[in-house]
Amino acid sequence: MRFRGLIQDAFQHNDKKGLVLTLNHVEGVPQVDMTVHIARQKTQILDIGRNSTDGQPVSTRACLTGKPVPAYGSILVDWAPANPDFRALRSQWVEEAKTG
């Protein structure tokens, strides 16, 4: 299954060059150096967040009512545009670029 996720939030990383994207509705598993498309721009994943509970890059859980919550995770991407419009990135899809 190809990787994709819906951007919930975006912010610049203080210690590393790049943009952190928190994702919901994640399908597949992201990988470092994977090429992805965001808002018609091609970029690469520089690092992958790991859930503090299970150590996985993509996690699922149930909410307090017991209903399942969509898969979620976070990635750090190489983002060239200076001063990105974070609000414009929210609700955009990050999708693995087709290879070959």
Image (spheres, rainbow, N blue to C red):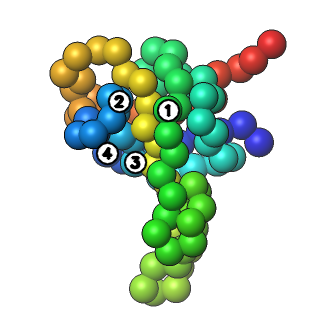
Residue sticking out furthest to the front: 15
Label 3 or label 1, whichever comes before in sequence order: 3
Residue at the spot of label 2: 18
Q: Secondary structure at mark 2?
A: loop
Numbered disc in front, either 2 or 3? 2
Q: Position of residue 31 (x, y in %)?
A: 63, 39
Q: Are marks 4 and 3 in contact (CB under 8 Å)?
A: yes
Left/right of residue 10 with respect to residue 76 in the rendered view: left
Q: CA distance from mark 4 to mark 1?
A: 17 Å
Q: Secondary structure at mark 3?
A: strand
For residue 60, above or below residue 81: below
Q: Are marks 2 and 4 in contact (CB under 8 Å)?
A: no
Q: Secondary structure at mark 4?
A: strand
Q: Are marks 1 and 2 in contact (CB under 8 Å)?
A: yes
Q: Amino acid at mark 2?
A: Gly
Residue at the spot of label 1: 46
Mark 3 crowdedness (10 Å alpha carbons): few <14, some 14-19, many ≥20: some
For residue 40, above or below residue 72: above
